[in-house]
Amino acid sequence: MPAEIIDGRAVAQRIRDGLPARVAKVEEVLGCPPGLGVMLVGDDAASATYVRMKEKACAKADIYSRQVTLPGDASPEQVFASIEEMNQDPRIHGILVQQPVPSHIDAEAVCSATAPHKDVDGFHPHNLGELLRTGTAPFVACTPRGVIELIDSAGTEIRGARAVVLGRSNIVGKPVALLLLARHATLTVCHSRTRDLPAVCREADILVVAIGRPKMVKGDWIKPGATVIDVGTNRLEDGSLCGDVDFDEAVEVAGKISPSPGGVGPMTIAMLLANTVESAERKAGLA
Ligand code: NDP
């Protein structure tokens, strides 16, 4: 029997539907809605599209958004001054600097420059450190948080499960691994030097794949009945999008599977909005 599809669009929509009521409560207390500041440096078309999507999503949830756009040759001083200005702006409760930033800007320094209490992306060393130390943080990065929400929405028990995370990046693989560990999964993290990857993946009750390799994970890598979350987002030559998992094969073996597109992607934006609202709720003393 084919796997149950974990519909990221539907789960994300449920989360987004719950936000306007919380936004209204924040506004009652603070006199302004939650606010997201989005910085875009340069004119990368894909980044500009992501920023527009985030602004639209804010508008739908009644969240105030403010975009700061700097030219691709903006100096580091200009970039850091703009971040500091948003750090100080009382209408802004969350700050997101769209990555990648141009190569002459230090991306790590950008993450550190955002005030930790406005770091809705969850990449500030303070928030990453808290995640490592305690298994949670004031802000958990949006994509990893979305992955856990999808697993929960599918009703898959994380506690005690054998979880395999494929990929160890700072933005996806490592935080997902820490979150699963905090929820008492027995964890294996794989990467490009892992030996016999298919055999390790076949041990997984929960398999999270974030490697950026189109359709690399085949059906016979998957334990029958496993829950599979495909974070990969790859554009093929014909312009279409696909995940890191060979969906057509995997759906015949897995128990539950989140496709890509239509899985983690919509969750990432929903989690960004949720983090922004939570930040404002904290300021309002509601959380
Ligand atoms: P990175 O390139 O930063 O990391 C990829 C990871 O996969 C690395 O740890 C790398 O290993 C590992 N890897 C690469 N190739 C192989 C291989 N052949 N075998 C085993 N491991 C391998 O990618 P990201 O984490 O940033 O992104 C991963 C995917 O998730 C991408 O497709 C990206 O587009 C997508 N993504 C989707 C998001 C969403 O909102 N839906 C958000 C963020 C990312 P090593 O460390 O050894 O190099």
Image (cartoon, rainbow, N blue to C red):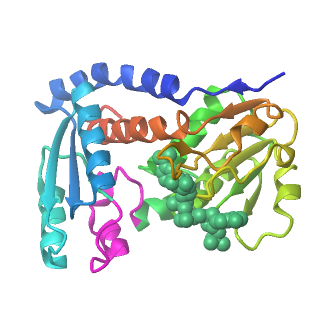
**Chain part drawn in magenta:** 99-124
Residue 173: image location, x then y, percent = 60, 58
Can residue 169 be seen at all in this image of the molecule? no
Identified at 53% across, 33% down, the residue is: 262
Q: Main secondary structure of the magenta part?
A: loop
Can residue 59 be seen at all in this image of the molecule? yes
Q: How many marks?
A: 0
Is 23 within the magenta? Answer: no
- Is 237 left, or right, of 113 in this rendering? right
- Look at the image and tell me in which quarter the C terminus lies: top left
Residue 28: image location, x then y, percent = 16, 24
Identified at 41% across, 64% down, the residue is: 126
Instruction: Give whichever of 25, 249 is nearer the camera.
Output: 249
Q: Is residue 249 above or below residue 78?
A: above
Instruction: Give whichever of 257, 82 is nearer the camera.
Output: 257
Q: Is residue 150 above or below residue 272?
A: above
Is 103 within the magenta? Answer: yes
Image quarter of residue 285: top left
Instruction: Give whichever of 263, 87 is nearer the camera.
Output: 263
Residue 41: image location, x then y, percent = 21, 64
Picture quarter with ligand 1: bottom right
Identified at 12% across, 47% down, the residue is: 90
